[in-house]
Image (cartoon, coloured by chain):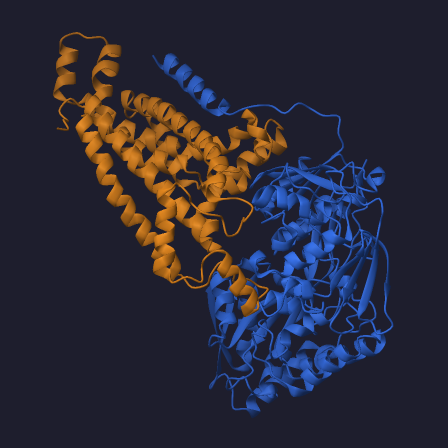
Amino acid sequence: MLKNMLKATVFATTMALAAGTFYTPAFAETVYNRGSAAEAETLDPHKTSTVYEADIIRDLFQGLVMHDQKTNLIPGAAESWTVSDDGTVYTFKLRKDGLWSDGSPVTADDFVYSFQRLEDPATAAEYASMLYPVKNAEEVNTKKGKPEDMGVKAIDANTLEVTLKAPTPYFLEMLTHQATYPVSKASIEKLGADWVKAGKLVSNGAFTAAEWIPNDHLKLVKNPKFWDAASVKFDVVNYIPTEDRSSAMKRFEAGEFDSYGDLPTEQLADLKTKFGDQIRVGPYLGTYYFAIKTDKAPWDNVELRNAISMAIDRDFLAEKVWQNSMLPGYSMVPPGIEGYTPALAKYADMSQIDREDEAKKVLEKLGYTPEKPLKMEIRYNTSENHKNTAVAIQEQLKPLGVEITLLNTDTKTHYSFLEQKGDYDVARAGWIADYKDPETFLGISRKASGNNYSDYSSPKFEEAMDKAAAAGGKPEERMKELAEAERILVDDVGNIPLLYYSYKDIVSSKLHGFDDNVMDIHPSRFISKD
Amino acid sequence: MLRYVFRRLLTAIPTLFVIVTVAFFLIRVAPGGPFNQERGLSPEIRANLEAQFGLNDPLWLQYVHYLGNLLRGNFGPSYNLPDFTVTELFARGLPVSIQIGASALILALLLGGILGTIAALNQNKLADYSVIALAAAGSTIPTFVIAPVIQLLFGLTWKLLPIGGWGDGAVLNKVGPVLTLALPQIAIVARLMRGSMIESLRSHHIRTARALGLSDWSVVVKHALRGAILPIVSFTGPAAAALLTGSIIVETIFAVPGVGRYFVDAALNRDYTLVMGTVVVIALFTIVFNLIVDVMYAFVDPRVRYD
């Protein structure tokens, strides 16, 4: 009886397991299996919002300009460009051999259509602001202007003219962002909402989207129509989302992944021992900071804000909490932007003991002691590392007479609360560069910015930012003004920078061209495998 | 019986309506929305997004629209995966979850049933103690421990199975997730089966059957098993609904593209339409499997009649 029942169990389970099974034959193809920590949300460049789809869209499409594997600006769909003397008119010459994957030419009209589509309120693009420097773009997006009034014009099939509101030296850098990439007008008109489906998507990059099974894989195949297809080494690039970082490490070890774009921080030391040079950790353009309510007592006192900021041991946070996957941060703009020197907090050179002594003096002067503590609440969004960071700071500030309570909410609740300018003391936040320029980090502290969670307001800071904007045509002067603005912001403790982000990748030693860079971007087009 | 089934299906409609209504308003009460994120949006851009998804309408109107679409079988677009509709996501994910869940359920019912029967027939002997120990371990070790151990042993050490992924539905890719999902269920079924089988074996009609000189096989399979199986049937309804609609832990660790992950991810992302889709799917599965269990009861236990 038992034998029969066991047989039945094995048979029934095997049948159930085999349901839906089909095998994919082996191909003599060069395949790059690229693990990522999360699923892409969309393949539509104009609806993009996360860094996870940035790599994918960069493989699928080509903007006017692009980044190479070291994040140098290189020609993309445009082979050359000129800028008018006043820095407001950019004339791009599109490459004549630029084709869509369906074989039709990429024209200036496609870019006019795409730029207008990005700003069209009906598209509902989260990154519409990327083109706000273009004349009338913001007006179109906010329903105050017509698309045809936008400063983008096709002079002829291969010449595109873009007129800006004011000189914007980082405009070309902005054009490396995936939101500014072109889409095929003909394809959208023909297929409607289905144009974006893998298998139907017409793109102008090194690869095309062949198949997308959410939470499993997105398969890209080499685009034979790409103007530089001869130098593309992979036939197939599989983007494989694997949320569980520990599983991802095992998949890498088993050879299922050639690279993975994140690491479990708590295992970093062991991973370095195990995988050696295949573990890549380095500076990434991102700042982890605490927003602090600068317009609410007692946090409206700059001396108090400075004392709190000074007393936090950032080395401990970076080394112990984040296992050296972050770097101690003393400025809002992280290092790594060419031509710019971040303005560090004045206590950055002091020893931690001296900082704590100094902070203690200030707190005592303001009447806060362990007997009569300063009450402070830290809000943070759900994450073990955010929690550990807050707990460490709670312990660090306790001896100085600061009684910290912690409040954890999920990410949506956290940012909804901050955006609605809720009543809080200190809140965890972070900022990752959309493009390589200090403005992206400083702009969030402007009075009008929706990301100014600290409610920081300083006429001097605004003036310096305005001056920097006005100096658009003079890069050196502009950087000086931006540094001046940052100096004001940091001295005012408009927020508390704690750490600079690092990229954390695991990359097979068989891969070449996966070069380290501060934007952590790695176009598959430049990568090859032994 | 047919009238009973029909009546039950009719009563499922208001039940489903209440579930959908409560879920619709509850998710909207939760603070934060689908467009709250680290990179804040300007009010104008947020307004564009809300207009696209109809979130600028009054809540009651959104509810009416949702119900209207639902009646037409349209679950709407996913907010966080806008390239897909909720229907498309379920059409791709549900077969995956069902394959994993059905395999785990079959394995649990058959293997658990066999182990429970062996234990009951060998009460207070080594086989019984072994099953009890196995059941205790199986039901106390969480899946987030079992899964990495399976990956480590079968994937990395012995290289018998892939670590993760769906592999276009290859059998080997399913083994890890199925085992992880099945082990705790095997333990539960074995424990239930052992208890009910012992009870059944002690009943008067079994004693009578033995006294009449029936063989052990006949006593156990033809008479005791029928009575012992009732608790397993009760367990199967909710277990099937839970297993077939996916497991977030198993699907996350093994990177399986089922729908289990949507249940939590959609709620955390305030992906309203996907949340509603998951609620409807779970509710339907629960209603249907509870009905199946009730019908099966009538077949297993002749005393149960539905008129």
Q: Residue at x 68, y 87 (%)?
A: A460
**Residue A433 spot, x, y in % from top left:** 69, 63
Residue A9, above or below A220 = above
**Residue closer to the observer: B91 or B48:** B48
Q: Position of residue B47 (x, y in %)?
A: 51, 65
Quadrant (top left/top right/bottom left/bottom right) for the C terminus of chain A: top right
Q: Residue at x 14, y 26 (%)?
A: B305
Q: Is residue B285 above or below residue A479?
A: above
The location of residue A165, given as percent across then percent down, is 73, 72
Say if A440 sits above or below A276 in the image.
Answer: below
Left-right relation of A416 to B122? right
Residue at x 53%, y 51% (from the top left corner): B80
- Give the quadrant of residue A66: bottom right
Whether residue A244 appears in this view of the structure is yes
Supply the letter of whichever chain is blue.
A
Residue A48 vs residue A258, the one in the foreground = A48
Tell me the quadrant of the picture where the N terminus of chain A can be found: top left
Q: Residue at x 58, y 85 (%)?
A: A304
Q: How many marks?
A: 0
Q: Position of residue B208 (x, y in %)?
A: 12, 14
- Look at the image and tell me whether residue A313 can be seen: no
Specify the chain shown as orange: B
**Residue sitting nearer the eye, A223 or B101:** A223
